[in-house]
Image (tube, rainbow, N blue to C red):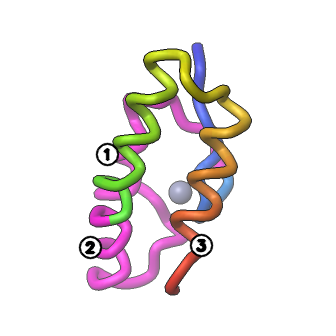
Amino acid sequence: MSGIKCPHCRSSLALDKIGMHFQKFCAAIPTPAARESSMKKYNQFYMQLQSHARGEITQDELQKEADKLFSSGK
Ligand SMILES: [Zn+2]
């Protein structure tokens, strides 16, 4: 089962659970506004997830993209 670590709280997430985690469960997202901005970033991250599903980027690269994307513009 492939997955990444949550860029916010570092818990391990299955790839198909990431959106739900950001939307509802991540304890490291402090405010509704921050949660909304995470969901917007998740929409961008979804492109990377699809690249990974096609085998174009590795899981390591996916993790790096997640860390970069979600740590920017806090
Ligand atoms: Zn989290």
Residue 50 location, x and y as percent?
Answer: 38, 29
Q: Is residue 3 left or right of residue 41?
A: right
Position above or below: 58 against 42:
above
Asked if the residues shown at circle 2 and circle 1 are in contact, with their CB atoms under 8 angstroms apart, the answer is no
Position above or below: 71 against 10:
below
Choose top left, top right, bottom left or bottom right for residue 40. bottom left
Q: Please give the name of the residue rendered at 46% of the width and 59% of the height, measured from the top-left corner.
A: 26
Task: Kindly identify which residue carries mark 3.
Answer: 71
The kind of secondary structure element at disc 1 is: helix
Residues under labels 1 and 3: Cα distance?
18 Å
Residue 37 location, x and y as percent?
Answer: 32, 75
Q: Please give the name of the residue rendered at 26% of the width and 73% of the height, measured from the top-left corner.
A: 36
Task: Kindly identify which residue carries mark 1.
Answer: 20
Q: Earlier in the sequence, mark 1 or mark 3?
A: 1
Within-10-Å neighbours for mark 2: few <14, some 14–19, many 20+:
some
Q: Please give the name of the residue rendered at 30% of the width and 57% of the height, measured from the top-left corner.
A: 23
Task: Kindly identify which residue carries mark 2.
Answer: 36
Q: Nearer the viewer, mark 3 or mark 2?
A: 3
Q: Is residue 68 left or right of residue 37?
A: right
